[in-house]
């Protein structure tokens, strides 16, 4: 009798203890933003029945130890499919790791979150994105497939660097790599398609300075035990020259920044990093997601096209591409409110059932359940300005038609008060507009495709350009008022006949939506270093003052200008600090401290038909995309 009473007391106390732990877990969930990860992550795991092993070690092919954390459902009675996440951001502190690890684990998956080589808990002191990424990923997949709790099928997941690492692994076509969900991951492209994007930091051969500097100063140290950088004024730091010394001034020590800014883009040394090239076959079933404001959106589409056209192309049902509104890795946040601010625009109807789609994609490929999102179109894209999702089986949509808008002026297109015009036919007379590009007085960045700067004052996305367009070193070409809506859906390119007094210079092109009240909202933009006009692998300096033709790739977009708006193209030679300044000398640029002023010209008319090329999609040719 006495033992029975004690037993009941122990059971009673145990029940109270368990209840208190569950209450604590619930409170941790509701207060997760105010609690350290070391507290709320274990409590949330307890609430959802997830066990955590924080001391997993995977050995790479060369013996380097890779640290990981394993999340698994408690009391799982069968072998589990696995979600594999790799990151350079500290697996124990990053919500990119433990947030979705808990999500997938409570839905019946094992989840392995790993610090990449040379960062945080993993060994190695030679960190450069993405050296060793393919081989380390293969070793990790071998390890996962060999575990008794694994069913041998692995899906990879994550945004930005976490997505790029998936493409580095997809190069291996490992039999266990059954599916991937890569977001904001266009930076995974290297020389493929002639893009030479490498970590998403180069466009047209121009280094994306604000993003590159911001990321490497925080995460690029080759010493995983190096202290964090001290506080400093980022605006002043970015103006310093030469470029190659920029980071060393604020965070001394070996840093991968040096590799990225000093190695020529077609140099064979880039082959030591595991970015996607034309020789790679991408066959892993992939759900690919990005946003129109992401600096790598065109690279993302290029990766999707590479998978479609490789020697062993993916089957149509094996790939889905979703392009949402918003900035880098903000596709989920854009559905949290309605309407939702994005730059100077207000966006509605932006939400998609992403969490449900993640599970359905992985359930199909890793568990043989469901339909694998087969009802979704291959491409699903949000039309900015229309607040509408459309779908197509190809990009650009097969029904989209090319249209050219030609530049015209009487030679005075400088600034928004100039006489620059966009028109449907080239002007019969040849004319030229010129401006003075001074690297010491660059055109400042206002919005556009910029991320990861570490500066909260940086604005990205669609932002009013009127202040910029008042400058004399910005050529402005504006159409008449549109008599009917104009829906753009595809890549945007500026084909320009140019000349320059310099041996090298940059050209920046920006498409703009001019509202009836005068607002000038950027639609999309891009840049090209003139020496790369024949391709990155074939640099050729300019002959001063001689005309030549170049094409500025301005990324892709789906955007609708309403009746009553006007279309505008801005041409200049800088966007600082988003882009590094070309010092116009024709030298290396990265090791120079003194620039020269360039007189840059854009020629147009019948003899030199400079124009912007768009893909237009009519209402009759478009289909609403299902939300499922």
Image: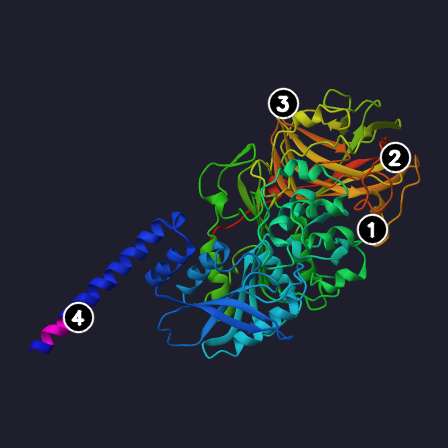
Of the pair 132 and 355, the residue shown nearer to us: 132
SS at mark 1 in the image: loop
Mark 3 or mark 4: name the one nearer the start of the chain: 4
Q: Is residue 129 magenta?
A: no
Residue at horizontal 25%, vertical 64%?
A: 18
Q: Quadrant of residue 134?
A: bottom right
State which mark lies toward you, 2 or 3. Answer: 2
Q: Are marks 4 and 2 in contact (CB under 8 Å)?
A: no
Q: Quadrant of residue 561?
A: top right
Mark 2 or mark 1: name the one nearer the start of the chain: 2
Q: Which residue is mark 1?
A: 535
Residue at horizontal 74%, vertical 64%?
A: 272
Residue at horizontal 36%, vertical 58%?
A: 44
Of the pair 266 and 331, the residue shown nearer to us: 266
In the rendered structure, the answer to whether residue 468 lies left or right of residue 429 reads left
The CA distance from mark 1 to mark 4 is 75 Å
Count neighbours of disc 3 (C-alpha within 10 A) and say few if under 14, some if 14 to 19, many if 20 or more. few
Boundaries of the magenta span: 4-8
The CA distance from mark 3 to mark 4 is 75 Å
- Classified by dominant secondary structure, the portion drawn in magenta counts as helix
The CA distance from mark 2 to mark 1 is 19 Å
Residue at horizontal 61%, vertical 66%?
A: 284
| Residue 571: image location, x then y, percent | 76, 33
Q: Are marks 2 and 3 in contact (CB under 8 Å)?
A: no
SS at mark 2 in the image: strand
Total marks placed = 4
Q: Which residue is mark 3?
A: 518
Count neighbours of disc 2 (C-alpha within 10 A) and say few if under 14, some if 14 to 19, many if 20 or more. many
Q: Which residue is mark 2?
A: 500
Q: Residue furthest left?
A: 1
């Amino acid at each position: 009798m006495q033992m029975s009473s004690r037993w009941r007391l122990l059971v009673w106390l145990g029940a109270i203890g368990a209840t208190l732990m569950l209450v604590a877990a619930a409170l941790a969930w509701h207060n997760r933003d105010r609690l350290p990860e070391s507290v709320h992550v274990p409590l949330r795991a307890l609430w959802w029945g997830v066990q955590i092993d924080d001391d997993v070690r995977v050995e790479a092919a060369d013996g380097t130890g890779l640290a990981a954390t394993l999340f698994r459902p408690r009391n799982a009675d069968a072998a589990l499919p696995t979600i594999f996440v790799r990151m350079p951001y500290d697996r124990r502190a990053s919500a990119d790791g433990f947030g979705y690890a808990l999500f997938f684990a409570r839905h019946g998956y094992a989840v392995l979150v790993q610090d990449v080589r040379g960062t945080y808990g993993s060994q190695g002191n030679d960190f450069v994105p993405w050296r060793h990424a393919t081989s380390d990923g293969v070793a990790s997949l071998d390890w996962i497939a060999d575990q008794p709790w694994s069913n041998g099928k692995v899906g990879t997941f994550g945004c930005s660097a976490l997505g790029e690492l998936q493409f580095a692994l997809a190069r291996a076509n490992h039999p266990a790599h059954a599916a991937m969900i890569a977001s904001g991951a266009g930076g995974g492209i290297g020389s493929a398609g002639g893009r030479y994007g490498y970590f998403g930091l180069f466009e047209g051969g121009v280094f994306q300075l604000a993003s590159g500097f911001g990321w490497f100063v925080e995460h690029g140290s080759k010493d995983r035990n190096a202290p964090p950088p001290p506080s400093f004024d980022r605006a002043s730091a970015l103006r310093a020259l030469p470029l190659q010394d920029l980071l060393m001034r604020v965070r001394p020590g070996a840093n991968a920044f040096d590799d990225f800014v000093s190695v020529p883009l077609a140099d064979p040394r880039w082959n030591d990093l595991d970015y996607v090239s034309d020789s790679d076959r991408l066959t892993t079933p992939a759900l690919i997601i990005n946003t129109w404001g992401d600096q790598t959106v065109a690279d993302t589409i290029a990766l999707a096209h590479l998978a479609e056209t490789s020697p062993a192309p993916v089957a149509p049902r094996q790939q889905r591409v979703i392009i949402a509104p918003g900035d880098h890795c903000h596709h989920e946040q854009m559905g949290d409110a309605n309407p939702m601010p994005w730059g100077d625009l207000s966006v509605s109807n932006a939400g998609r059932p992403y969490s449900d789609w993640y599970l359905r994609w992985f359930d199909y490929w890793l568990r043989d359940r469901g339909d694998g999102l087969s009802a979704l179109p291959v491409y699903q894209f949000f039309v900015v300005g229309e607040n509408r999702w459309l779908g197509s089986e190809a990009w650009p949509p097969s029904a989209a038609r090319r249209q050219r808008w030609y530049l015209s002026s009487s030679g005075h297109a400088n600034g928004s008060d100039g006489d620059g015009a966009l028109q449907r036919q080239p002007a019969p007379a040849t004319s030229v507009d010129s401006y003075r590009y001074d690297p010491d007085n660059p055109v400042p960045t206002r919005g556009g495709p910029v991320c990861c700067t570490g500066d909260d004052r940086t604005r990205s996305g669609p932002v009013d350009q009127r202040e910029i367009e008042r400058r004399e070193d910005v050529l402005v070409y504006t159409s008449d008022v549109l008599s009917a809506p104009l829906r753009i859906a595809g890549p945007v390119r500026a084909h320009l006949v140019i000349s320059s007094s310099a041996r090298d210079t940059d050209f920046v092109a920006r498409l703009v939506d001019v509202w009836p009240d005068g607002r000038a909202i950027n639609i999309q933009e891009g840049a090209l270093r003139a020496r790369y006009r024949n391709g990155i692998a074939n640099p050729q300096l300019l002959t001063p003052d001689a005309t030549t033709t170049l094409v500025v790739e301005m990324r892709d977009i789906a955007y609708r200008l309403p009746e009553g708006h006007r279309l505008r193209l801005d041409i200049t030679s800088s966007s600082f600090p988003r882009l590094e300044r070309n010092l116009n000398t024709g030298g290396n640029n990265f090791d120079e401290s003194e620039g020269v002023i360039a007189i840059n010209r854009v020629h147009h008319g019948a003899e030199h038909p400079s124009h912007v090329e768009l893909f237009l999609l009519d209402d009759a040719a478009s289909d609403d995309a299902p939300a499922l």
